Image (cartoon, grey):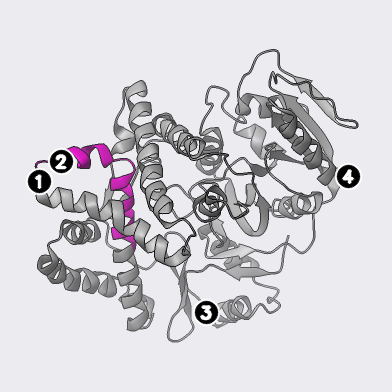
Amino acid sequence: MTNKFVADDQWFRSKNGQGVLAGSPLTYFGVTDAGSKILDAIETNSELPQNHAQLTDRLLATGAVHPVPNDRAPLADITIVIPAFITNTQSLDHLEELVASLAGLSIIIVDDASPLHIDIDGVRVIRHDINKGPGAARNTGIALVTTTFVACIDTDVTVTSQQIATLAAYLIDSQTGAVAPRITCVNDGTFIGEFESHHSPLDLGAVPALVRPMSRVSYLPATVLVCDVQSLRSVGGFDDSIRMGEDVDLVWRFLENGIACRYVPSIECPHRMRQSMRKMLRQRYDYGTSAALLDQRHPRAASPLRAHALLLLTATTVLMGYIYFAIILVVPTMAYFVVSLRSTSIPIRTRTQLAWKALTSTTRLLARAIMRAWWPLFFLASFVSLRLGAMFTFSAFVPPIVGLMRHKPGHPIRYLVMRILEGMAYGTGVWVGSLRAHSLRCLLPVITVRRSVAR
């Protein structure tokens, strides 16, 4: 498929160059002199030696490197499936623009019982008599696909034929079943456009990733999702019974069946923003309601937090305001992880940086979990415990203030309010979904105690 790879953003060479620590979770690869030359070629973006496949396949499997395809996939090998529920002429106009931008590709539109009639020249339109949801609509279209690849595309995104062909190239001659681009939101100068350009839940960031549950990129949105048809059918397609989170469920079923999924942010596809703060909060709430259903199908994968017990203890003391106790805990915590990585021959300064990054990330993720999944508990507890109230206050205000300083929005007060409310909206959805499913397991953290070791 490719003779070029790009190293993951977490890529650390050992002192002697005979190993690399990278991937998700971080994995140490010890290599021979020949392997060291391959690592050198990856770092310098040079031509790889002919015997690279064994090592690069291992690096690919752990997310230590990411492929860069040489060519685009042929347009004749790709079919587009667009689930559509059109309620106004503006949405219909955008659908027609989307179809025009996908010239050269076979297109199937599945009209999911739209109030407005859909009829576009040169496009096959299949109509549902009743609204069945986006997952069922995609399945209807996928059942008619005869090409090697299928691209599921929502009506409110902008994407071109060449972008789809580039994404499909990641699926050629590989163990990858699905790939998705970066879904961005254009900042049009309004508060909503400005806020969504920084905090859209569809935007998974600027760094490529191998998708893994509870990692930096734990799912792929079906806004634009290119799949290998054979792999897609082997896992049963989308789950028709889920109306929210059906794309997350599909990606996790790919992974459970040993089929990789990749995130490719070098390709950006703009997405239309919500039209009001109320609709933005409704979107976050709806996403939250899917957590319990996803947890039933993929136990513990939808947990709000995964953390090492020692890091979590230190982060908790920080958020509770036990500053002196936290300082005392930081030293042994850092030492523990620095010593755990000693066999990697990674410089001690780098190991210290990694340990510090792990601690700060755990603190940030704990604060995020408090203001999303756990905020009702901490809100009530703040009335009876000053320390728990401090945790709730810190989690509610510090991350938005950091975002305010970083992004410098034109509407600072509304920005702060929205940052707080969007997390609470998601958390409300999680609790409502949990009560409907009669299960609170998706609210529980995953706490690990395994020592970090080189492998």
Q: Residues within 10 Å of mark 3 (few under 14, many from 20)?
A: few
Q: Position of residue 262 (x, y in %)?
A: 59, 53
| Camera-nearest label, 3 or 1 | 1
Find the distance from the CA under tag 3 to the CA under tag 4.
47 Å
Image quarter for residue 124? top right
Instruction: Give me the disc on residue 32.
Output: 3
Callout 1 secondary element = loop
Find the distance from the CA under tag 4 to the CA under tag 1.
63 Å
Q: Name the residue carrying label 2.
A: 381
Q: Name the residue carrying label 1.
A: 385
Disc 4 marks a residue whose amino acid type is Gly
Quarter of the image with the N terminus in it:
bottom right
Instruction: Give me the disc on residue 273.
Output: none
Find the distance from the CA under tag 3 to the CA under tag 2.
56 Å
Q: Are marks 1 and 2 in contact (CB under 8 Å)?
A: yes
Task: Check the image and report above or below for 263 versus 322.
Answer: above
Nearest to N terminus: mark 3 or mark 1: 3
Residue at 42% x, 31% y: name it: 289
Q: Name the residue carrying label 4.
A: 104
Find the distance from the CA under tag 1 to the CA under tag 2.
6 Å
Nearest to N terminus: mark 3 or mark 4: 3
Disc 1 marks a residue whose amino acid type is Ser
Nearest to N terminus: mark 3 or mark 2: 3
What secondary structure do most residues of the magenta stretch adopt?
Answer: helix
Q: Which residues are magenta?
A: 361-384
Residue at 34% x, 76% y: name it: 353
Residue found at the very far top of the displayed protein: 129
Residue at 53% x, 53% y: name it: 204
Q: Is residue 145 visible?
A: no
